[in-house]
Image: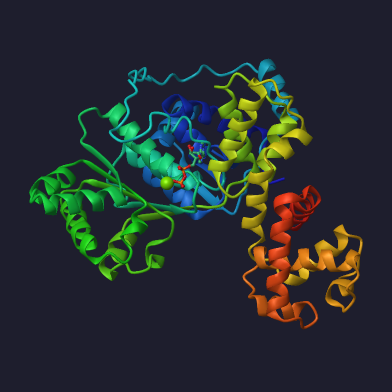
Amino acid sequence: MSWGSTDAIRLWRDICREIRKKSDTAYNVSFKDIVPISYDDTELLLGISEEFAAEWIIDNYSDVLDEAVQAVCGSSRKVLFEYGHMPEHVSAEEELELEAEEETHVSAPAVSLAVSAPAPVQHRTAEKCLEENTFDNFVVGEENRYAYTAATTTAQTPGIANPLYIFGGSGMGKTHLIQAIANDVASRQPKAVIRYTTCEEFLNEYVASLKSKTDFRFRDRFRNVDYLLVDDIHFLGGKPQIQEEFFNTFNALCNSRKQIILTSDKPPAEIRGLEKRLVTRFQGGMTLQITESTFETRLAILRQMQENMATRFSDAILNFIASRIRSNMRPLKSALLRLSFLASSGVEITLESAEAMLSDVLDKEAEERSLHLSPEAIQKAVADYFELQVKDLTGKKRTANIAAPRMLAMYLCRKLTESTQQEIGSAFGGRNHATVHHACESVEADLKTDEQTRRAVSIIQRSLQG
Ligand code: ADP
Ligand code: MG
């Protein structure tokens, strides 16, 4: 076990308690997964996943950590980090053992740390941002932990990374996070001038200002700010005129040490048609990725949504949605809303009925994930469904029990792969493209009228999603 002694665990837990008094967010994001290894009178050795995470703590939280160590140990310790430790949480049993030991322990007089009560924060919503896009409502998981940490730190301590650049796929929470920064700054620093915009709006406003000859006002609006937040900056790609304007805005703000935060669907160097000088600028701060969501995050998002809903679904239903809708948080959330609406209209929601009610969303999801499928995989799935052999589908026989599945398999190849009709024809025993074309049209017509065909397509498609 890579955990240190019970003493080290206890000591670290006390230190964490102190850290949490200062900042729960700092604890949850940066300290929670640390593994205490050993300590003595002069040093405290902590295990951490990677160098980046340790540097983050040293750069941002060394005061918080030092004070917590001082409070618990009564004197300071040199804190050292060892990399490569994955989070390993104390099991409930170990936790209980510790608690029991603690109760029989005569503890040393606590060294008190004067912690002033945090000033109450009045929640405000930044212009053009949604009220619900806050840090509190953002579920933190492995895939977005660093982006979240950077976002909260930037909101509280601007200037550490300029620009802060967060990228990731659609529906991964980028807009939520960038607006959470804007809302957090609006709440904690009411005097700060915050400008949140989508890149598209930035372009539209600029064009309008040129037309009405008020571009000086436009510049004033975007350059006299403390925080400039631009969502979907990849939109700049291939639009040289607006890149010039943005480059100047960017420089003006950086020179006066104002914070810039950007989101994008790609890292800077991969945005097509983005000038080199902008790529370099964007890379000059901190670039962080939000990767594909984990099941735990998706489930937590659903649970969080449920808290504000009249309907409570069983864990089985929530698990079902979280495991089947993975690509994007938007359809995930709409699926729950749809079920909730149906439930409040009196429809009974079971796993079977949920599957039927969400079939369009589930099919779309399956389609997304099937894009890299091969015709061979599709032939196998179709053959399995109809209890045939793949060679029946690629062979010459034209009896109805084989011809219909063959056409369906061709249709699915067309729908789920990038293959051309010609390529599909070759995969089916050297048939020509006209045969494939005819098969697709015939299945499409059947789908409009025939429930059995619809059902077959739906089931096969889902089996292909793995
Ligand atoms: P993006 O801008 O990356 O396309 P959004 O920020 O618009 O994605 O997220 C889509 C929806 O999913 C929003 O309703 C957002 O609040 C929600 N969402 C995404 N990620 C999270 C998360 N980690 N915690 C809570 N809600 C999330
Ligand atoms: Mg977005």
Seen at 61% across and 40% down, the residue is: 298
Q: Measuring from the top left, give residue 69's x and y in whole percent.
A: 47, 32
Residue 420 left/right relative to 55: right
Q: Is residue 190 above or below residue 80?
A: above
User: Which of the two residues, 159 or 209, is positioned nearer the viewer here?
Assistant: 209
Residue 182 left/right relative to 328: left
Residue 312 left/right relative to 170: right
Seen at 43% across and 50% down, the residue is: 55
- Name the residue at the bottom extreme: 430
Quadrant showing the C terminus? bottom right
Can residue 406 be seen by looking at this rendering?
yes
Quadrant showing the N terminus? top right
Q: Is residue 428 above or below residue 308?
A: below
Q: Is residue 378 above or below residue 308?
A: below
Q: Measuring from the top left, give residue 153's x and y in whole percent.
A: 37, 40
Seen at 44% across and 19% down, the residue is: 112
User: Which of the two residues, 78 or 382, is positioned nearer the viewer here?
Assistant: 382
Quadrant hosting residue 100: top right
Q: Measuring from the top left, give residue 317's x and y in whole percent.
A: 72, 32
Seen at 88% across and 59% down, the residue is: 386
Q: Measuring from the top left, give residue 170's x and y in whole percent.
A: 49, 51
Can residue 41 be seen by looking at this rendering?
no
Residue 292 left/right relative to 319: left
Numbered label tally? 0
Q: How is the image coloured?
A: rainbow
